[in-house]
Amino acid sequence: MIVLYVPGDAAAAAVGADDVAGALHAAARARGIALTIVRTGSRGMFWLEPLVEVATPEGRIGYGPVGAGDVPGLLDALLAGGAHPLRLGRPEDIGFLKRQTRLTFARCGIVDPRSLDDYRAHGGYAGLQRALSLGPAATVEEMIGSGLRGRGGAGFPTGVKWKTVAAAYAAQKYIVCNADEGDSGTFSDRMIMEGDPFVLIEGMTISGYAVGATRGYIYIRSEYPHAIAAFREAVRIARAAGYLGANAMDGGFAFDIEVREGAGAYVCGEETALLDSIEGKRGQVRPKPPLPAHEGLFGKPTVINNVISLASVPVILAEGAAKYKDFGMGRSRGTMPIQLAGNIKFGGLFEAAFGVTLGELVNDIGGGTASGRPVRAVQVGGPLGAYFPPALFDTPFDYEAFAAKDGLIGHGGVVVFDDTVDMAEQARFAMEFCAIESCGKCTPCRIGSTRGVEVIDRIRRGEKIAANRAVLADLCNTMKFGSLCALGGFTPYPVMSALTHFPEDFAGAPMRVAAE
């Protein structure tokens, strides 16, 4: 019996993994070979997808990228001992994977995401078991001690948020998981939901137990049909096995999860707009106070965490807060799943402790640009993140280090651009994006972004460049400090960073052309 592992998540499927799995089944039947294919999540080395792994006495051996046309020769190689041009060896020995510190993503690409037994065999539910032994209050303190900060962008201490909700008096409390992963260059949430969904279910369950919430909602963007289907199936399996419900894991507490599908608005990634959307309203930002921890979903105390924050909870409880806090630097503790995208040679997910520099990520780990041209700019933190030039590549991946250089980590997306990029055009895109995605509730965001597009267009046409650059800077200042939420408040980051670090692109030429 040959046992093969073929990723089944969206990233692998997009480059033909389903076709490869089908071809493997067909070729095995034609040759009378006994074959089992386990559809896993992706390991996150996207330039090697579809990555096919075969179980051997020495561990799994990877082959990739495999196309459907490679299948006959691959089966011949497996039957003859494994030699093949696409043979990669043990995936764990590939430099990109070997250099990582996989805590949150330890099981991704390894387990069958539809198998609760597989999840438990790889350490699953040890975190919840320990939480039950500690009790709710001590579980909250463990989270505070871990130093975990929100991985969705704001970086607020997770344990403090939990403690606030735990102390709130209410007959009903909620856990809300923000899976509205809309930032450019980000895919870690999707990878977890498709490759290791039970870790997120366990994290939400621990949170519910710790703060006294009996119901959880996960809000998944509609553009993620694979993730929605995978997570709904995992919830069904967990509920049927007694890990969710009136007596979750026989722990004497009730907790269940409902999946809500988003409607496509970027602003619903903001926590209060997300709450409105779950309640069936138009997604609009709510003023604060009151904070969601006091009056959140349906007016009740609510913990709102993003996918990676909650998926990090089980390992923290299982291994202990002190061990998790050993990783990282300064106030940025633990690991961060960094997503390398854009014009980059080795794109994918790289989980590492805080402190690795931007230059290491782009040049050493990512291999530089896919085009082979020089890197000119890197945007970190999604469409509202700042653009960093190579001169800032010594910046460590750390909340405070990025903030000190007028940047933000956001959700950990790193998008690379080579020297053909027009940074004035990128600044215009940021303003246009904000104008399109604004919920319209506050004037600085709604009107400021529209005026921003107009001002940048005047600069690019060469009209009163100095005066219009001053107007643009003043407009960004108004949006940064006057907007109701981060959509308008963070849009100045890409605009001002482009203006500051790449002033030559705002000299009035309609389009910058790189020197050959």
Image (cartoon, grey):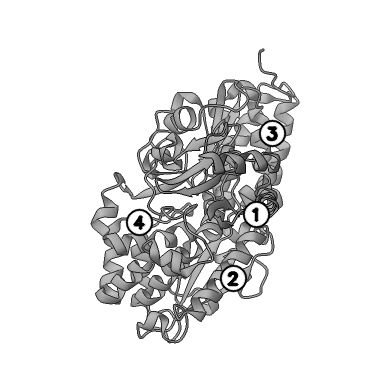
Q: Measure the C-alpha gap from mark 1 to mark 2.
A: 35 Å
Q: Measure the C-alpha gap from mark 4 to mark 1.
A: 52 Å
Is label 4 or label 1 in front? 1
Element type at mark 3 = helix
Is label 4 or label 2 in front? 2
Which residue is denoted by mark 2 in the rendering? Answer: 232
Marks 4 and 2 in Cβ contact (< 8 Å): no
- Callout 1 crowding tier (Cα within 10 Å): few <14, some 14–19, many ≥20: few
Question: Is 316 placed left or right of 481 in the picture?
Answer: left
Is label 1 or label 2 in front? 1
Q: Say whether disc 1 or disc 2 marks the residue closer to the N-terminus.
A: 1
Which residue is denoted by mark 4 in the rendering? Answer: 148
Seen as rendered, the residue at the extreme top is 516
Looking at the picture, does residue 192 appear above or below residue 382? below
- Callout 3 crowding tier (Cα within 10 Å): few <14, some 14–19, many ≥20: many
* Quarter of the image where one finds residue 372: top right
Which residue is denoted by mark 3 in the rendering? Answer: 456
* Residue type at the position of mark 1: Gly
Percent coordinates x, y for residue 49 in the rendering: 59, 42
Which residue is denoted by mark 1 in the rendering? Answer: 32
| Residue drawn where x is 39% and y is 42% of the image | 100
Percent coordinates x, y for residue 178 in the rendering: 53, 63
Q: Say whether disc 2 or disc 3 marks the residue closer to the N-terminus.
A: 2
Q: Measure the C-alpha gap from mark 4 to mark 2.
A: 27 Å
Element type at mark 1 = loop
Examine the rendering and report whether any part of residue 198 can be seen.
yes
| Residue drawn where x is 41% and y is 48% of the image | 57
Question: Is 137 placed left or right of 259 in the picture?
Answer: left
